[in-house]
Structure formats: structure tokens, C-alpha cells
Amino acid sequence: MILYHGTTVDIKEIDLQKSKPNKDLGKGFYLSAEKEQAIAMADYKAEQIDGVPVVNAFEFDEACLHDSSLKVKAFSEYDNEWADFIFANRNNPTSANVHDYDIVIGAMADDQIYNYVSDYMDGSITREQFWVLARFKYPTHQINFCTREALKCLEYRGYEMMERQLGRESQKDNDLFYTCSLIDYIARKTKNKRV
């Protein structure tokens, strides 16, 4: 299976020391099977530094998912376990992972979803309200390679420089984002709590 990593540089050698803490699935090297998602991430990173979007491709040996020497955690959907896992990783006070998995697979929590998780954890919304809000977001796919052993399952296949993508969201997606953001804003301002 080919997996993609969106960034602004060609990455022939993966260095886990450059991984940032407090990411959804913990510290590690993130890839996606969805090339469009990697392109969007590359564009986002390029915009931050006024750089050029680059998508790196890696061949993933899927047999590693069944290798008993590797610990693999897969979240197949948004659920309570996933939300708690994301919150623990995003709020980890150390640079070490809060888990001991080699590979973690799951949906990405964008900042809007993370705000919902935070609201739930601080009691501003109920878990049921969280799921009503989160249901309108479209999950994206990510695989986090957390250890050097996990990286052995990847083989570099090259990179592609991309054109910057501006305004790539459809009107429907923008309208849906606005509606969800408005609901989130109202819930925060009214401190809406179920009695």
C-alpha cells in the first residue's frame, strides 16, 4: 500500500526525533492512504512558511499490521475510546508518548473536533452533545509510525512537488463548517449544560 506524507521537503530518511509531541495519535511520523489529505497538509505547511508543498510517498508493508512483534492500535471510527486517546495525547505534559504502540491508526481530530473534546472534558458539553457536533465532521485517515521498529515497515518511493491550493473547499463544505462553528460558538457562550 502506498502512503503519503504532506510537508515542504523531500524526506528520504525519517527522523523520529523531529516529531512533535501532543499530536492526535502521539509523537511519531504521520502518513495517510489518502493522497488528497497529504496534499492539503502539504499546502497548509507551505502556507505557514511561504514554502512549496511536497508530498512524499512510502510503500507500507501491510504484513506489519499482523506482526506479533509490533503493537498496533487501530481506531475504526469516532468513538469514546478514540476521543479519550486523542485528549490524552493532546494534553500530554511530556515529550514521550502516553502509549506504547508502534503503529496507531485512526481518524484525525482537526482543531474543531479537538475543541469539542476539550468542551466535553471540561464539562461544557455532555458526551452526547459532543457526538452530535462531531458527527457533522468528515473523518480523515492517518497512520502514526511511533517507533524505529515501525519505520522498518516503510520504504521510500519518492516525492512530488505540488502547486499551492487556495480555496479548495466546496461551498457545501464551507457552509457545513460555518454551521458547526456557529453551534460550537453558541454552546461556549451559553455554557450549555444538560441538567
Image (cartoon, helix red, strand yellow):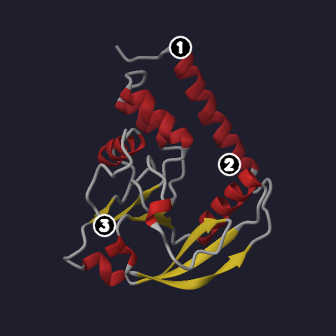
Which quadrant would residue 50 be assigned to in this image? bottom right
User: Given the current orientation, which residue lies at the most extreme left position?
Assistant: 68
Does residue 169 show up?
A: no
Callouts 2 and 3 close, C-beta under 8 Å = no
Q: Which residue is mark 2?
A: 173
| Secondary structure found at label 2 | helix
Give the CA distance from mark 2 to mark 3: 34 Å
| Secondary structure found at label 1 | helix
Q: Amino acid at mark 2?
A: Asp
Q: Position of residue 86 (x, y in %)?
A: 39, 46
User: Given the current orientation, which residue lies at the most extreme front position?
Assistant: 17
| Secondary structure found at label 3 | loop
Q: Position of residue 119 (x, y in %)?
A: 44, 28
Q: Position of residue 147 (x, y in %)?
A: 34, 67
Q: Which residue is mark 1?
A: 190
Q: Amino acid at mark 1?
A: Thr
Q: Which mark is residue 102?
A: 3
Label 2: how many Cα within 10 Å (few below 14, some 14–19, many 20+): few
Taking 109 as reference, is 91 above or below it? above
Does residue 54 show up?
A: yes
Q: Residue at x 48, y 15 (%)?
A: 191
Q: Amino acid at mark 3?
A: Asp
- Decide which of tag 2 and tag 3 comes sooner along the chain: 3
Q: Position of residue 143 (x, y in %)?
A: 43, 65
Q: Residue at x 48, y 69 (%)?
A: 15
Q: Residue at x 24, y 79 (%)?
A: 67
- Decide which of tag 3 and tag 1 comes sooner along the chain: 3
Callouts 3 and 1 close, C-beta under 8 Å = no
Q: Residue at x 58, y 74 (%)?
A: 11
Q: In the visual, does 154 lie left or right of 4?
A: left
Q: In the visual, does 153 lie left or right of 187?
A: left
Q: In the visual, does 173 lie left or right of 98?
A: right
